Every structure is written in C-alpha cells, then in structure tokens.
Image (cartoon, grey):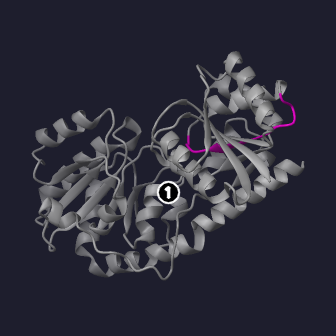
C-alpha cells in the first residue's frame, strides 16, 4: 500500500483543501495510507482528523526554510513515506529539498493557480523541479503557464479537477428562498467565494449596478462566503444602492441547498485555475457566467455550451450576460440541459481520482 503525505502550508476551507480532502477520502485505507502535514491550522485539519488521518504541524516560514526541510525529511523517514504531494510553491520547494535527508521519497506537485512566476522563481523551478517526479496541471492554461515558468514540459500532466456526479440521484428542493424571503418569480444570482482581491467581487458588484440601470427584471444576488474584504464589499454595495438586491449570507456549509435555490452562478475571479465551485453548480444543472481567465475556457466553451464567458473587468459585458441569461429563455434552457453532462463527461471526480492514483503508482515505480 502506498504511503502518501499531503503537504499544505495553510489548511483552510478553499478549493485546494477540498482537492486534498477528496483524494484522502478516496484513497485512505482503500489504496493508500494517508498522512497530512501543515503549517497554519484550519478547517481541513479538523476534517482530516475526524477521518482518522494522522496530522503533523510543520513550521514552514519560507520556501527555503532549512529547518522545515530537515524536519520534513525526518518525518518522512519515520513514517516510511513513498510520496509527498504538495499544493503550492513554498511546500513544493521544501519537499524537494527534503530529499537531501530522505532520498527515496517521490515528490508530486499540483499547481492550483495561473500565476506567472518572477525571475528568481523561474530559475528555482529550473534548478529544483527536475528532482521531483511529476507536476499536475488542473487545466490546459495551467500547463502553458508552468512551461513559461521554467517547469519542464515532460514533467507536466493535465488532470482536470472533478466533482461527484451521480446520474440517478434526484436533486433535492432548496429552503434558501424561504430563508431570505425570495419569491419564486425572482431570478437568483449566486456567488460563492472567499472575499479576497483575486475573486473580483468588487467587479461583480459594479456589474450588477450596471445591469440594474437598464433592466427591470426581478432579481436577487446571494453572495456566499467571508474573508478580508467582506466589510469593504459590503460598503461598496451600500454606496451603489444595492443593499436590497444583494444578500450577504456569510460562510455556509449547506452549499448544495444554496445552489439549488439559485438560477445562475457567477464566477468573477481575476485568476482561476479550474474552479471547483463552477463544477459543483454545473453538476446541479445551474448555468454559469465566468470570467475568461485560467482554466474557465476548458469548462465553458462552444462545445460544452453550458454558460457565458466575459472578460475580467468588463462591467457592461458582465451586465449584458446577466441580462441575456434572464431574458433569453431558449439559451438559458440549453445551458441548463448541458450543465450536468459536462461534469459527467469531462470533470467527473472518479476520473480525476483514477488518473491521480495511476500517477502515484507510476511515480513510485520509477
């Protein structure tokens, strides 16, 4: 049985954490023995410990923290780890360097963001990444950017993110409209994200203000999540007179309930690899408007026909897309019909798990 140590600096509650949780749930005691090491404790640690996963605190102050390098190598040697699976550059560099103390371990890195590295990072990539076994890109754009960042092309394998898809499971009714006093004739927009700069929530709010200027349609927008910009976004909503149109729900655990009470999901990010949130809503049959960044084009395109892409920052373009979704019933119903089949055929969790496990096996055997 393969022994895998998942390594993550901040173990919070975002998409990367969901990615790790999905892998551990699928593999632990089935195909692998899983362990988890982290620096900053968050929800993921609690979730993994409830599953019986052994977790370890490892102080990782920076990507070249030699104390962390040595401690990680020692930990892997004690646990007889076969593979370290890292999620961000800091942990990845530390994991690669830990091979100095435990040479037999294999390192795999999943790149979750579409970010162009600086000159020093590109040089470090060229020097260090040849010493790891594989790099997973969660979208085609991610692969393209990683090559430009100095990652050897032959190290990269594209494995799309996936979410659970069940063909015969009936979709449950939602209580969210009753909770917030929204009638059935009102079109509900949905945003689920952390309130942080890269999520583009100020762009979304200003786009809704543009939409309201020329539309008389009944609508509400549910903004789900929390984060450092929560109060700032709330102030912007008040400044633009949208306090009756936009509802802040805070952090929610009943995401399925929220999704099923909505008509349209909006992803307004300025940088996105392959969004779990987009895939989750599509699996429930909800169409999407998303910014044309990162891996969003792998999901939303003419072939998949499940939503509309807009340029990041184009407030009028976003407003027009919202209007088209509400007014053009024929197009909306086509997007709705195609939404679930896109997940079934291309972004299925089972496919992602199978391809990732096969990569583990191949890397261990090298």
> Is 218 situated left or right of 166 in this image?
left
Q: Name the residue under label 1.
A: 296
> Is 275 situated left or right of 185 in this image?
right
Q: Is residue 265 magenta?
A: no
| Residue at (55, 61) in percent of width and height | 298
User: 239 or 6: which is nearer to us?
Assistant: 6
Find the magenta span and give its range: 102-114
User: 220 or 95: which is nearer to us?
Assistant: 95
Q: Does the magenta stretch include residue 106?
A: yes
Residue density around tag 1, few if under 14, some if 14–19, many if 20 or more, within 10 Å = many
- 101 lies above or below 260: above
| Residue at (65, 47) in percent of width and height | 144
Q: Could you say where residue 275 lies in the image, as x and y percent from the top left?
A: 48, 54
| Residue at (40, 47) in percent of width and height | 269
Q: Could you say where residue 169 lies in the image, as x and y percent from the top left?
A: 45, 79
> Is 285 situated left or right of 82 in this image?
left
């Amino acid at each position: 049985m393969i022994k895998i140590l998942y390594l993550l600096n901040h173990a919070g509650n975002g998409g990367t954490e969901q990615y790790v949780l999905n892998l551990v749930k699928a593999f632990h005691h089935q195909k692998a023995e899983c362990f988890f090491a982290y620096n900053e404790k968050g929800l993921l640690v609690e979730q993994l410990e409830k599953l019986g996963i052994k977790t370890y605190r490892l102080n990782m102050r920076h990507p070249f923290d030699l104390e962390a390098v040595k401690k990680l190598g020692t930990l892997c040697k004690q646990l007889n780890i076969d593979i370290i699976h890292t999620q961000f550059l800091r942990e990845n560099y530390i994991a690669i360097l830990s091979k100095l103390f435990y040479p037999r371990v294999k390192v795999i890195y999943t790149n979750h963001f579409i970010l162009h590295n600086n000159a020093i990072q590109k040089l470090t990539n060229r020097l260090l990444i040849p010493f790891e076994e594989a790099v997973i890109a969660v979208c085609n754009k991610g692969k393209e950017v990683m090559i430009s960042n100095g990652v050897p092309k032959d190290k990269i394998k594209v494995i799309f993110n996936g979410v659970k898809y069940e063909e015969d499971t009936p979709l449950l009714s939602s209580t969210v409209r009753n909770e917030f006093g929204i009638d059935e004739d009102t079109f509900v927009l949905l945003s689920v994200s952390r309130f942080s700069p890269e999520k583009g929530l100020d762009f979304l709010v200003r786009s809704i203000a543009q939409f309201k200027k020329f539309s008389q349609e009944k609508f509400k927008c549910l903004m789900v999540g929390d984060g450092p910009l929560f109060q700032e976004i709330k102030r912007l909503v008040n400044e633009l007179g949208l306090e009756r149109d936009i509802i802040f729900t805070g952090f929610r655990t009943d995401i399925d309930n929220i999704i099923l009470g909505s008509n349209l999901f909006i992803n307004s990010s300025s940088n996105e690899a392959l969004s779990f949130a987009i895939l989750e809503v599509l699996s429930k049959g909800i169409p999407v408007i998303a910014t044309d960044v990162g891996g969003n084009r792998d999901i939303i395109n003419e072939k998949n026909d499940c939503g509309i892409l807009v340029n990041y920052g184009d407030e009028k373009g976003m407003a027009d897309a919202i209007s088209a979704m509400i007014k053009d019933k024929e197009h909306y119903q086509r997007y709705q019909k195609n939404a679930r089949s896109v997940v079934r055929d291309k972004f299925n969790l089972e496919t992602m798990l199978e391809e990732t496990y096969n990569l583990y096996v191949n890397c261990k055997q090298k």
